[in-house]
Amino acid sequence: MDTTFRERIGCANSPSMTKQASLRAAFSLLEMLVVLSVIALLLALMLPALTKARRAGRNLKCVANLRQVGERFIVFADDWAYASRGDRNGRSNFYIEDFQESIYLVDEFWQNPSAIRETMDASTQPLMCPEGPIELKRRANRPCSDGAVYPKENVSVGFNRRLHRPEATAAQTLLTSRILNYPNVPLALDVDGLGISPTDGNAYYVAPPQATADGYDNGAYWIPAMRHEGKLNVAFVGGHVAASRMPLDQPGWQWSFYPDS
């Protein structure tokens, strides 16, 4: 029996059995490498689709934000629908800056008396494009025209400057509810704060050059951000939102409009 037992032990440790065990181990490792390669290939194929889906989601969020801005403007511009347009004007008129500040919650719309500065929440602030800079701050006791919202290079949504000033150096324009009679006038759009001219412009108000020499024809105030697959998202006075790769060539988009205040 002892001999038989030793023979069995010897048989278990024979070179042929050891070789077979090695082959099995090697085959298992090869299988694992194949599986890992397949997973890596699938991830490589899926990543562009996932990236595209995320960008599409951020674009939908941007459109929803701009639509909210447009709809809120309709209420703000209505003489009887909005409770308060701020402390500078009465029920019959307002500045576009008043509306801007009502969304940024700065100046007379400041809601946190215990704070001097705040970081805005990008998930709830409609004037922050999801594809733009993720940090934007506000200061208390200042209007937008005095740097209430900063840093200016992080501003990602700007307002139509021709609704703000009739010319580059003129005083602010007083708007009335009559502006709602022109629904196809651009109100707000994606802008690129990094494209600001240090001497001539800012990202809070933008205006494209048009045929008329009105102070905006040098292009210093035109910094659109074509960040949504090469398209510009624009909210209009009528509350709707549209996108275009060639926004200045779209029929019916009234870029050169001036309010008849």
Image (spheres, helix red, strand yellow):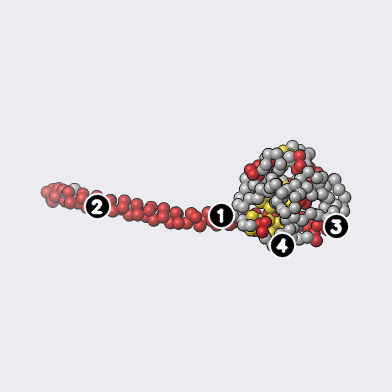
- Per the image, label 4 sits on a secondary structure element best described as loop
Residue type at mark 4 is Gly
Q: Is residue 194 left or right of residue 237?
A: left
Residue at the spot x=80%, y=59% of the render?
Answer: 180
Q: Nearer the viewer, residue 218 or 129?
A: 218
- Does residue 82 appear anywhere in the picture? no
* N-term mark: 3 or 1: 1
User: Which label number is shown at residue 154?
Assistant: none
Q: Position of residue 229 (x, y in %)?
A: 58, 55
Q: Which residue is mark 1?
A: 54
Residue type at mark 2 is Leu
* N-term mark: 3 or 4: 3
Q: Which residue is mark 4?
A: 252
Q: Are dots 2 and 3 in contact, CB under 8 Å?
A: no
* N-term mark: 4 or 1: 1
Q: Residues within 10 Å of mark 1 (few under 14, many from 20)?
A: few
